[in-house]
């Protein structure tokens, strides 16, 4: 086999699957498909620039990487679940994700401890902040290692489905015929046009301006770290203000407070309806917004941008994502604000589901649209879920108590998601593949591919409705916050390890004694669904001390 990535050998003229895009979704999918013997061609319109969305993992993301690695026998994806190995083997430029911090700001006022919340992430082997140029290049190399072919700086101008192929016409006039095409490259593509897919706006939506910058001051040098917590700079810090937020995340932060020369990501999200584009430079707009809040301004006082990117499209999804021999996936199917770690978690779910369906279609030589309807419904469910979350976040940003209450409900959900996926990973590793696969083909309307607790879905719906009541004038922000806190205090499924229902409890730190307390609570007081999730996890996080489920 020839190894020149810009050459398609005779045996590759008609690849089984052509994947448009070279980001993490495209390359991870290519690794799996090539690993299982399909002829895969990757077409990238742009060289990797670092502006691809999605840098931080959550425990639920990492457990899903473990599931994917076990299911499809791809150790490269398992590595993504281990922050230590990421830093040693993938890229020194990557960072760690040990905390999720939230600080609410009022214009002209300094940092207030009473308006902050810090969630120290309980993780078995650490979470990561990926430096995307290095991650994407590393995964692209893995795909090539399994036999995938790559062509960069190639634009597809036209996609035409034929009887047994899709004909792709490149900007150069060259034609490629492929049995199946997956488009991850972005909205309004040639494949989207071939499907007749329209961009559907959803929710209020935000304008997003992102930058990689040096000289971003670690926030612990501006405001004290909360008791028992990691430094602010060892995770993603959300500066929240009425109508938006600025997220700050550092690279090279694994050994403590990073140096001022270390690269950081700064992302500004603004309510698109309230704050339309002013025509200013993106970095200038970030600084102008930060200047209204002294603590944020102090953090960015010495920062210098490396490059910026913008996304003005708000929340959106494609009206159609599947057709015979064609699939829109991830960035070509839905988009929106990167708040709350959506991007990599969404990507991992779609890689898992798409790989499963594509390998089954190849086995049966059936590439009809019906084989991929689950993926279409799942992506529409994801878009709806994100629309509602972002709308609620924009409303909650108006008041520190409502933001704190809403953030706690979301954090609780990430814990249950992680437990659910940990259970699936353990089930799959034990050889009970059928049971694990069933648990990873959940109702797509929920917006996630895995099982979720019905009690949590009800709590989330209650919280989003409370925020909507505030947005529509039926309740004040304070009243909605109080309702959510009361619900958190009274919910039988909420574990006692953290005062989710206590607005004065602002630091989450999970210790071994707290894990033991949680296990005792789960066995004696928790609803059966919670016990089912907590039981395999164990006092030390790995579940080895608990044996099998009853």
Image (cartoon, grey):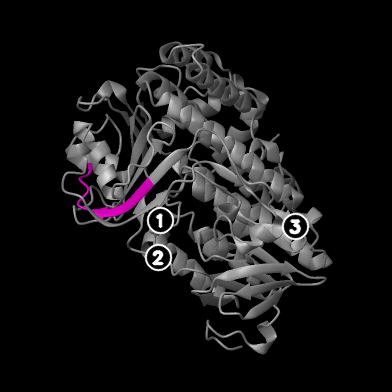
Instruction: Work out whether mark 3 precedes mark 2 in sequence or the reverse, and give the earlier one.
Output: 2
Q: Quadrant of residue 202?
A: top right
Position of residue 87 measured from the top left corner of the image (x, y, whole percent): 37, 60
Q: Secondary structure at mark 2?
A: helix
Reading the image, the residue beneath label 1 is: 130
CA–CA distance in space, label 3 to label 2: 33 Å
Q: Is residue 416 visible?
A: no
Q: Nearer the viewer, residue 479 or 442?
A: 479
Residues at discs 1 and 2 in contact (Cβ within 8 Å):
yes
Question: Crowding at label 1, few (<14), some or many (≥20) Cα neighbours within 10 Å?
Answer: many
In the foreground, 55 or 46: 46
Numbered mark located on residue 323 in the image: 3
| Vertical arrangement, residue 125 with respect to residue 77, above or below | above
Q: Disc number at residue 134? A: 2
Q: Is residue 217 magenta?
A: yes
Q: Residue at x 55, y 54 (%)?
A: 331
Residue at position x 49%, y 34% in the image = 390
Q: Decide whether residue 134 is among the magenta residues.
A: no
Foreground: 364 or 506?
A: 364
Spot occupied by residue 280 in the image (x, y as percentages of width and height)? 29, 47
The location of residue 91, given as percent across then percent down, is 37, 64
Distance from the alpha carbon under mark 1 to that under mark 3? 33 Å
Describe the element under mark 1 as helix, strand or loop.
loop
Q: What stretch of residues is rendered in magenta?
A: 209-218
CB atoms of marks 1 and 3 within 8 Å:
no
Q: In the displayed structure, would residue 173 be above or below residue 272?
A: below
- Residue 90 seen in the figure: yes
Q: Is residue 64 above or below residue 15?
A: above
Q: Earlier in the sequence, mark 1 or mark 3?
A: 1
Instruction: Give neighbour class at mark 3: few <14, some 14-19, many 20+ (Cα, 10 Å).
Output: many
Between disc 1 and disc 3, the foreground one is 3
């Amino acid at each position: 086999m020839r190894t020149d990535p810009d050459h398609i050998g005779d045996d590759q003229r008609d690849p089984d699957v052509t994947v448009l895009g070279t980001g993490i979704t495209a390359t991870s999918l290519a690794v799996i498909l090539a690993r299982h013997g399909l002829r895969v061609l990757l077409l990238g319109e742009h060289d990797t620039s670092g502006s691809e969305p999605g840098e931080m993992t959550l425990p639920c993301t990492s457990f899903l990487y473990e599931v994917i690695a076990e299911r499809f026998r791809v150790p490269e994806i398992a590595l993504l679940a281990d922050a230590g190995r990421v830093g040693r083997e993938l890229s020194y430029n990557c960072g760690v994700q040990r905390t999720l911090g939230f600080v609410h700001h009022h214009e002209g006022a300094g940092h207030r401890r009473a308006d902050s919340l810090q969630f120290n992430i309980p993780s078995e082997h650490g979470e990561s902040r990926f430096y995307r140029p290095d991650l994407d290049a590393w995964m692209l190399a893995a795909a090539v290692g399994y036999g995938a072919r790559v062509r960069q700086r190639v634009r597809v101008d036209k996609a035409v489905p034929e009887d047994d192929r899709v004909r792709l016409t490149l900007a150069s006039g060259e034609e490629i015929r492929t049995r199946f095409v997956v488009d991850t490259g972005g909205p309004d593509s040639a494949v989207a046009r071939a499907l007749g897919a329209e961009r559907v706006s959803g929710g209020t939506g935000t304008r997003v301006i992102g930058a990689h910058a040096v000289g971003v001051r670690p926030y612990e040098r501006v405001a004290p770290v909360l008791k028992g917590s990691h430094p602010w700079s060892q995770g993603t810090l959300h500066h929240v203000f009425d109508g938006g937020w600025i997220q700050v995340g550092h690279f090279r932060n694994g050994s403590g407070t990073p140096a001022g020369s270390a690269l950081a990501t700064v992302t500004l999200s603004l309510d698109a309806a309230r704050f339309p584009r002013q025509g200013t430079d993106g970095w200038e707009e970030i600084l102008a917004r930060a200047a209204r809040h002294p603590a944020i301004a102090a953090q960015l006082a010495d920062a210098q941008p490396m490059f910026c990117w913008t996304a003005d499209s708000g929340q959106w999804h494609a009206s159609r994502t599947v057709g015979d021999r064609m699939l829109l996936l991830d960035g070509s199917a839905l988009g929106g604000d990167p708040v709350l770690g959506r991007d990599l978690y969404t990507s991992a779910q779609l890689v898992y589901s798409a790989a499963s369906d594509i390998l089954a279609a190849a086995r049966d030589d059936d590439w009809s649209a019906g084989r991929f309807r689950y993926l279409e419904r799942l992506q529409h469910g994801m878009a709806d879920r994100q629309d509602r979350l972002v709308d609620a976040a924009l409303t909650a940003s108006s008041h520190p108590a409502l933001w704190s209450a809403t953030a706690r409900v979301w954090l609780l959900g990430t814990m249950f998601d992680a437990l659910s996926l940990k259970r699936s990973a353990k089930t799959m590793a034990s050889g009970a593949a059928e049971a694990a696969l069933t648990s990873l083909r959940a109702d797509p309307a929920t917006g996630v591919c895995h099982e979720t607790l019905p009690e949590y879905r009800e709590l989330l719906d209650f919280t989003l409705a409370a925020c909507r009541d505030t947005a529509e004038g039926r309740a004040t922000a304070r009243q909605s916050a109080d309702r959510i806190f009361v619900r958190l205090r009274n919910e039988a499924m909420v574990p006692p390890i953290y005062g989710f229902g206590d607005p004065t409890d602002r630091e989450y730190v999970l210790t071994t004694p707290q894990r033991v307390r949680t296990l005792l609570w789960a066995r004696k007081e928790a609803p059966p669904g919670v016990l089912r999730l907590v039981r395999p996890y164990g006092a030390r996080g790995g579940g080895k001390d608990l044996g099998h489920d009853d």
